[in-house]
Amino acid sequence: EGVPKNMQFLDGLAWLGINSNNDESWNSSVGKIVSRADKFSTSQAPVSGSSARVMDPKVAELLQILHLHAYVPALTQRGIVTFPDLQSVSEEVMDACGFSPTHKETFLRHFAGGAAPNPGDSASLETLAARREHVARSLKNFAVASLEANSDFQGLVEMLLTSDSEQKVQAARALGSLAWNDENQTAIARAGAVEPLVQLLVAGDASGKAQAAMTLGHLACNKENQKVMATPEVLEALVRLLSAGEAGGSLQAARALSWLGMHNEENQRAIARAGAVGPLVQLLLFGDAQGKKDAARTLGDLAGDKESRSAIASSGALEALVQLLSTGDVKGKAQAAWTLNWLATDDVDMQTLILRAGAAEPLIQLLTNGDASGRTEAARALGNLAKTKDRQTNIGSSAVFQALIQLVRAGDGKGEYRASQALNWLAMQNNDSCMAVAQAGAVEPLVRLVSTGGANEKAHAILALGFLAEDNDFKTVIASPTLLEALIQLLGIGSSKEMSLAAQVLGWLAIQNDDNKMAIAIEPLVQLLLTGDAEGKAQATQALGCLAGNQGNRAAIASTEVVQALVEILSTGDAKGKSQAARTLGWLATENKDNQVAIARAGAVGPLVQILSTGDSEERFQAVRALTSLAMNNEDNRLAVVSAGTVELLSQLLNTKDVVLNSEAALALRILEDQKHDENIKSEPDVDTGELVKETSRLLESCRQDSSCDSKAIVREEG
């Protein structure tokens, strides 16, 4: 503000728009401009005795082209208005007019000694035209740079609507550079930029189309923009640009399609239907390194929609991705692994096709020999491909386990996360894989990750250790004081998810392992049961039930608060919660008269009987066992259970198709028979009823895990 708006100022700003690329340069240039403007303002005082003359327009034009137009008023005041006048100007006059040293040199070079160019000369005119074009371009660049610097979205949109193709490209570029945050993306779209950008994409020259595609892609990072931008016109124009084969345009089109499809299955489907998959595969096969990488990324961003995945699988993309995985550069290999992972996610058929395309071996090579990013993405993809037992066996080689463990030990946060995730999936419900993972040395780094990792790393490390703990041979090894301390600590300070996972794994560690049952602290699990969210309560209930398998723990667990909380879950919990609560109450009542009394007084019988009527198979099974445990050797409880209508419901369960459930019901009916029969059982000296029921229940629970088991035979054999 306050600087005279003369040609010298505009010239300086034009130069500034092109040449200033950092703050230091900008500040220095602004200082020079202000200094020159100050000199100009002091040079405008009238010179006494000068005659009022007007400068020849051709002279003024020439001075403008030479960046000397700012001195026209001072020269005119001194009567210097023609070419001969210019040739006679001395350095003293130039000093008086306020010439800078640089401009003085320019003036002398062109006008000293009669060397002034003649605007009528054709060669001079060509020179003047070139200079004029340079000045015009400089001013255009500055105009765009000025609008960009001030985030003047409306001004840039107006430039998109001009007839000047170069200025359109500059305006599109400026909008693209500003569209890197959600707020600007929204504001630019609201300023009306989308439609003229689409027109530039459809009808512009090659440079304009590429620039429009880039800016539209940036705007599509915003979810609201993404919803409205994927029109047939835009998608068809992007596919044409993608297919045209010009490197810059193809890359920008691929990137724009990637942003339009990201996390939006409707757009992914529309992009595939617009014919984008074929050109993307061509770019993946025949593009340069960057083109291959961008094509792979876009195919990955289209993988959320089943129809798109089908189009990708039938287009030869899987083989092309495997080729990039094998022969691409470092970034290309990592990108191929990333895309294969997304294609494989939650799609068993696609996982099979990927493995048939030969992805396993190059993924293993990348996991073993790649850079940090490549190893991370390979771990992620291999884990995703190993979610079924047969694939776990095929993928889970010793080399893979060693590479994953090394990544857990030495990777960054993301590498640790993906490696622990892969170990988790490889160990899931597969005893052979569990043994191989443990023998490869995974326990120690996974335990460390539980203590020191980020949220994602902790979660998968906990689950991996939990799956390893399903093998009884490893329970004692895994349940080190360090791990138990870390899990117990998470119960107190972890996130809701971490607390739930910690409780889940503590329960797994306690199953069929008395040493672990005694080593695991009870109070933090009780607090989670009382104060946690729904999932936390369910997992705490399950863990406490596992700990209650130890007779010494039952009294410590069964406080009034715990029993009341479990009974409340029987009435208000979801199916999983009710089942776990019934199971835990059953264990707490086993061979513990005080707990039997406390549980019955807390009102457990009614909800348990209700579950017999309305629950699913697992809920009913656990309710039958809990009622049996409450009635065992406790006449008051037996009568209360019978009075609640249990016998009729148990009789109905004898006809269910679930043989384990009806066998458990038969056992319960045996316990609930009348007092006379119960006395007959007790009168037989060789029969220990408590031990009989305990052993039969254990065998029945094992039988539920084995489809070939004859549960009725167990009941007959155990009497």
Image: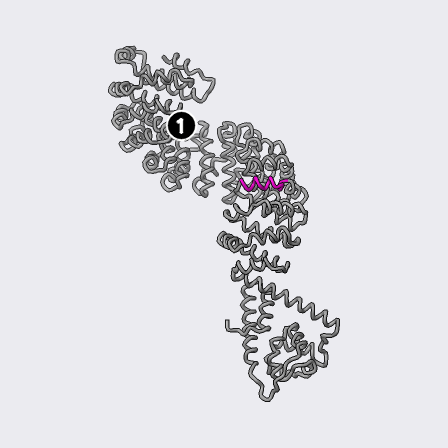
Q: Is residue 412 left or right of residue 525?
A: right
Q: Position of residue 605 (x, y in %)?
A: 29, 24
Location of residue 159 with respect to 321 vertically, above or below: below
Residue 212 location in percent, x, y? 60, 52
Q: Residue at x 33, y 38 (%)?
A: 531
* Type of amino acid at the residue the image marks with label 1: Ile
Residue found at x 28% / y 18%: 642
Q: Nearer the viewer, residue 23 or 306?
A: 306
Q: Position of residue 53 (x, y in %)?
A: 63, 83
The residue segment tinted magenta is 266-277
Residue, x 52% and y 38% (percent of image)?
Answer: 405
Relative to 658, is 195 on the left or the right? right
Let me know if residue 270 is in the magenta part.
yes
**Quarter occupied by the C terminus:** top left
Q: Main secondary structure of the magenta part?
A: helix
Q: Position of residue 228 (x, y in %)?
A: 53, 47
Furthest-right residue in this view: 122
Residue at position x 39%, y 12% in the image: 716
What kind of colouring is applied to the model shown? one colour
| Front in this rendered view, residue 338 or 391 | 338
Instruction: Note whether 143 is above or below 679 in the view shown.
Output: below
